């Protein structure tokens, strides 16, 4: 087992560090070099003609990627909703022949997700799976499959598969919008160069040790809160999920603007608040973070250098400057590192947290 971890103490840390390669692999050959448009090789032109409505179904970390994808689709002008697969049997919105249902599942074997996928198929929806495992049940059962090509992920807490899912869903959103609307959304031209830079930016980010310093500084806090807006919201949820999964400490993620509608009652000097800035109404998020700061909570701003939040926050976790569609994913990698180092300080069994399984095959 140690051999498989290479120079790293845990598979999770190894997999966090594999993200530049995983992303490069995910993107390779999927952008048409002749016109810079998203080709996604398995989908001939017009595959998504007539798609007006997308439902994304998933659990756990994949649900956060699905939420990210649903927001990217909405921003690209396509109606989309992310739904917890385990709720789908009781709360599924109606499907029609303009509905595409996308199962997001790194393993392709999660029982809740397979059950929702089958329900959507029975209801007559077109289906697509976004997965990491070739030959998985979800890949076999859906009409189409988009492989994220992240390579094997051993750590129970998903890291590189989340990033690859979110990036592939961002590309897919552009492609669905292009097929369905007849032209790619206007932001494609700024997205593609930033996407090409992302593996290199991640290498730089992974060479820093600020996340370890922050983890040490706030060790022993009562609770850890994560806030974000827009595409930063699923990142806040994922930051908190990762933290609780491997540290066993209490952590919660909120939409920044929701903090004042209840969770603020929990905020004290003993509850650090990680604020994710993606360039989407950052001034409002900063105001929300300051409300927590006024109650004594230390604020850790996850944002590029030179951002106004750096002056206001107590601490700064730096991310490279990027398109709003990708900034949250860079922030997420910093938060993965914070969780990892916090769990390592507590000597937790990071790769196999208690009570959790890599893939849950019961409903
Ligand atoms: C389990 C794992 C989570 C994972 C979820 C969904 O609960 O512990 O890390 O996010 O299953 O897995 P999937 O394979 O469907 O992405």
Image: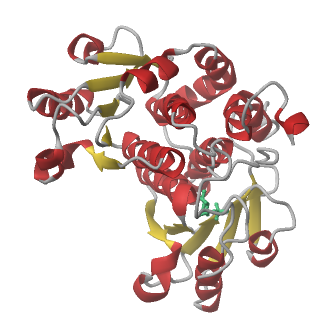
Residue 360, relative to residue 31: is it above or below? below
Q: Residue at x 65, y 85 (%)?
A: 118
Q: Residue at x 28, y 32 (%)?
A: 272
Q: Nearer the viewer, residue 171 or 6?
A: 6
Percent across and percent down for residue 234 are: 42, 48
Q: Nearer the viewer, residue 166 or 36?
A: 166
Q: Nearer the viewer, residue 67 or 288?
A: 288
Residue 307, relative to residue 226: is it above or below? above
Percent across and percent down for residue 14 are: 74, 33
Residue 254, relative to residue 135: is it above or below? above
Q: Nearer the viewer, residue 48 or 229?
A: 229
Q: Residue at x 65, y 71 (%)?
A: 360
233 on left or right of 170 = left
Whether residue 35 can be seen here: no
- Name the residue at the bottom extreme: 122
Quadrant including the C terminus: bottom right
45 on left or right of 48 = right
Q: Quadrant of ligand 1?
A: bottom right
Percent across and percent down for residue 130 are: 69, 59
Residue 52, relative to residue 12: is it above or below? below
Whether residue 330 can be seen here: yes
Percent across and percent down for residue 205 are: 58, 18
């Amino acid at each position: 087992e140690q051999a498989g971890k290479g120079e790293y103490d845990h598979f999770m840390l190894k997999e966090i560090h594999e993200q530049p390669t995983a992303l490069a692999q995910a993107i390779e050959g999927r952008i048409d070099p002749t016109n810079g448009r998203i080709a996604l090789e398995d989908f001939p032109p017009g595959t998504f003609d007539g798609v007006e409505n997308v439902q994304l179904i998933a659990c756990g970390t994949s649900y956060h990627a699905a939420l990210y994808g649903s927001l990217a689709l909405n921003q690209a002008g396509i109606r989309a909703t992310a739904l917890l697969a385990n709720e789908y049997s009781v709360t599924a919105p109606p499907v029609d022949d303009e509905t595409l249902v996308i199962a997001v599942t790194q393993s392709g074997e999660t029982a809740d997700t397979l059950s929702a996928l089958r329900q959507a198929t029975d209801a007559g929806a077109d289906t697509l799976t976004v997965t990491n495992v070739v030959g998985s049940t979800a890949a076999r059962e859906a009409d189409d499959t988009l492989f994220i090509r992240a390579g094997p992920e051993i750590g129970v807490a998903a890291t590189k598969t989340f990033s690859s899912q979110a990036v592939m869903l961002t590309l897919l959103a552009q492609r669905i919008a292009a097929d369905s609307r007849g032209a790619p959304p206007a932001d494609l031209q700024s997205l593609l160069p930033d996407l090409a830079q992302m593996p290199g930016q991640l290498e730089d980010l992974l060479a820093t040790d600020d996340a370890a310093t922050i983890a040490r500084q706030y060790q022993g806090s009562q609770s850890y809160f994560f806030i974000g807006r827009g595409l930063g919201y699923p990142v806040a949820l994922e930051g908190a999920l990762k933290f609780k999964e491997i540290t066993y400490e209490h952590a919660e993620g909120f939409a920044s603007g929701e903090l004042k509608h209840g969770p603020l009652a929990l905020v004290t000097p003993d509850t650090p608040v990680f604020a994710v800035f993606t360039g989407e109404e950052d001034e409002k998020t900063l105001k929300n973070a300051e409300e927590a700061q006024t109650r004594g909570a230390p604020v850790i701003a996850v944002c590029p250098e030179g951002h106004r939040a750096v002056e206001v926050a107590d601490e700064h976790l730096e991310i490279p400057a990027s398109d709003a569609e990708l900034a949250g994913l860079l922030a997420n990698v910093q938060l993965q590192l914070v969780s990892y180092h916090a769990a390592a300080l507590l000597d937790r069994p990071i790769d196999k947290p208690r009570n959790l399984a890599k893939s849950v095959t019961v409903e």
